[in-house]
Amino acid sequence: MQSKPHTTYNKNRSKQAQSNSKVYRHRQQTTRTHHLDTRVFALGGLNEVGKNMYCIEHENELIIIDAGVKFAEDGLPGIDYVIPDYTYLVRNQKKIRGLFITHGHEDHIGGIPFLLQVVSVPFIYATPLAAAMIRRKLEEKRLTNQTTIVEIQSDSSIKTRFFNVGFFKTNHSIPESIGIVINTPNGRVVTTGDFKFDLTPVGDAADFQIMSFLGISGVTLLMSDSTNAEVPNFSISEKKVAMAVMEEFRKTDGRIIVATFASNVHRVQQIVEAGIKFNRKVLVLGRSMENTIQTARKLGYIKCPDRFFIKADQVNHFPDHEILILCTGSQGETLAALSRIAAGTHKYVSIKPGDTVVFSSSPIPGNAASINIVVNKLYRHGARVLTNSAFNNLHTSGHAGQEEQKLMLLLTKPKYFFPVHGEYRMLKIHAKSAEEVGIPEDHSFVLSNGDVIALRDGEAHFSHRIHVDDIYVDGNDISGLSTAVLRDRQILSEDGMVSVLVSMDSHSGQLLSRPIIISRGFIYMKDNIPMIREAEYLIQDELSQLIQTKTTFSEIKNTIRDKLSSYFYRKTKRNPIIIPVIMNKK
Ligand SMILES: [Zn+2]
Ligand SMILES: [Zn+2]
C-alpha cells in the first residue's frame, strides 16, 4: 500500500501539460473491481457561511478539503468561534491522508489550529500564500511540529492509493485561490472553492481551459460555492474597482483613512498601490491588517518599497495630503483601530476636519448599528465619511453571482451537483440555477452537515447521516466544555440562577435549619418573598422525609432541582439554573 503522497512540481511547460492531463484524463478504471462506495460529506459549510470542511473517503483513505471557523454571532455570549465537530475524524484518524486548502480565508483555514490539537493530519497542501498564513497560525499556537505543510502550485498533482488530486486556478478576493479535482475509484469529484469569474482580474486569470476540459472528460460530482446564489448579476471586475479607488484618491486632498477587511487581499493591494501612486505614506493599523500586508508583501502580492510604510508615531511628521491610513474596523468592531480613532482613544491618530474616512467593504447584516455609532463619531470630529462611495458602489464580492454559478456548471458539466458554502436558501437557489442549465432536480444534493453522498461506478445517491454538532470555542479550549458553559450562559442571561443552601446532619437524618434560597437574575427577591418562602418550605418538607431514608447526596440534589424547577416554572414560566449547596455536619 502506498500511503505517503507525493507532489510534483513542473516548471517546464510541456511537462506541466503532461502532469495536468494525467490528472484530468484519469478515467474511472474498471467498473467491476471496486465494490466499495466512495463517500463525500461535509462536517461544516452547509446551512451556514463558515467553518467549511468537506471529506472524501474511500476504504482506508480519507482526504479533507478545508478546515475553517465560523465567527460567533451575537446570540452566543462570550464565544469566539464555532468549529465543526471533529469526532468522525478522531475515530477515523488512521485513514487521513491529508488536508487540502482552497485558499487562505478564515472560513477555510481558521480551524486548523483546533483540528491539529485533536487529530493528526500528516500533510497540509496549500498554495504559498495560504501556506504562509497557516504557518503563522501554527507558530502562534506552537503547533508547527504537528504536521507537514506542502506548498503546491495549480499544476501540482498528489496521488494516494485511491485518490489522484489536481488543481485549477480560480478568481476570488484573495490571490492563489484554487479549485480541486479529486479522481476517486468511483468517479471524479470537483470542488470550486470560493470563486467568481473575473475576466480582467487583479492577479492571475482563472484556468477556464481546465474547467471546460473537465466538462469534456467527465465530472461525476461538482461541489460549488453558493454564497451569492441570490445575487442575479455577474460580479464587477476588480479592475473597475481599482479605477474607482484611483479616482477617489485623485479627488482627495486631506488625509485618507480606509477601513476594510484584511482578508480581501486584492482590495488591500489596490488601496496601497493607489496610495503609492499619489505619493502617500502608508500607515497600517490593526493586527490582522499588519499580518496580511506583511505576508502579501513577502510573496510579492503587494509591491511597495519600505520607505512608503511609516510607524504610527510618525504620522504627524508628514503633510496631510501625503498620508494614507489603512485600518481594520470596517464593521464597527469596538476594539478595532477605526473605532478607537473615532472615539478619540487612539494613541497616535485623532480625527480632524479635512480627513476623509472610507469604508471599503459592505456592512455585514447585523453590524449596521455599530457602524453607525462609529460614523457619527467620525462626523462629529469633522471628518468626511464615505460609506457609500465609489469604493462601495463598485464594491464587488469575491463570490460568483447566479450567472457565474451557471457558467461554472456549464463549463464543468457535472452529472451530479452538490451546492456547498451557503445557508439553506442559498443552497436551494443554487440547485434551482443548476436545474435551469440542465441538471435534473433529483441529481442535486441539498444536504446538511453530516449527510453522506455515496458514489458508486459514476452514480451518486444519498446514503446515510453521520452525527455532527457545532462546537463552540471559548478562547482556545475546544474540549466541548465551553459548549456546556455556553448553554449555562444562555440560561443565565435569560432566566438567571437560584441557589439553595441546605444544612443537615446525615447521621441523625435531620435538617439543621430551614433551607435558604438566594437568586441572581431570576426574580426581584424583595417583591417575591412569599414565593421564595413557599419554595423553602417545599424543599424542607421534601428533604426531611428523604434524608430519613437511605439516600445519597446526588439524590438530594436531584430532588431539589426537580421540585424547584417545576415549582418555579409553574409560578414564573422561567427555568433558572438551580444550584443546590449541601452542608453536612459529621
Ligand atoms: Zn473566501
Ligand atoms: Zn469561504
Image: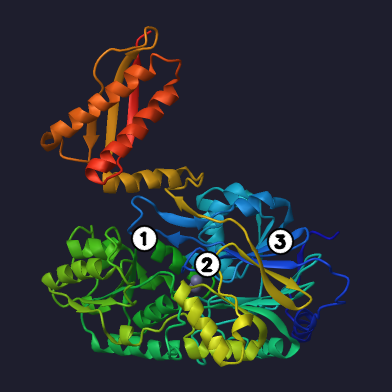
Mark closer to the chain start, 1 or 2 = 2
Mark closer to the chain start, 2 or 3 = 2
Q: Where is residue 142 shown, x and y percent of the image?
A: 55, 47
Classify mark 1: helix, strand or loop: loop
Q: Where is residue 206 shown, x and y percent of the image?
A: 59, 86
Whether residue 536 is visible, yes or no, is yes
Q: Are marks 2 and 3 in contact (CB under 8 Å)?
A: no
Q: Where is residue 553 shown, x and y percent of the image?
A: 42, 21
Q: Is residue 370 left or right of residue 61?
A: left
The residue identified by callout 3 is: 62
The part of the image, by quadrant, that contains residue 208 is: bottom right
User: In the rendered image of this protein, does residue 437 appear above or below residue 529?
Assistant: below
Residue 251 numbered tag: none
Classify mark 3: helix, strand or loop: strand
The residue identified by callout 1 is: 73
Q: Where is residue 277 shown, x and y percent of the image?
A: 36, 84
Q: Is residue 162 left or right of residue 153?
A: right
Between 165 and 436, the one nearer to me in the picture: 436
| Image quarter of the C terminus | top left
| Image quarter of the N terminus | bottom right
Amino acid bearing label 1: Glu
Q: Residues within 10 Å of mark 2 (few under 14, many from 20)?
A: many
Between 417 and 24, the one nearer to me in the picture: 417
User: In the rendered image of this protein, does residue 469 appear above or below residue 128?
Assistant: above
Residue occupying the point 32% across, 59% down: 74
User: In the rendered image of this protein, does residue 569 appear above or below residue 388?
Assistant: above
Real-space CA distance between mark 1 and mark 2, rounded to the nearest whole angstrom: 16 Å
The residue identified by callout 2 is: 45
Q: Residues within 10 Å of mark 1 (few under 14, many from 20)?
A: few
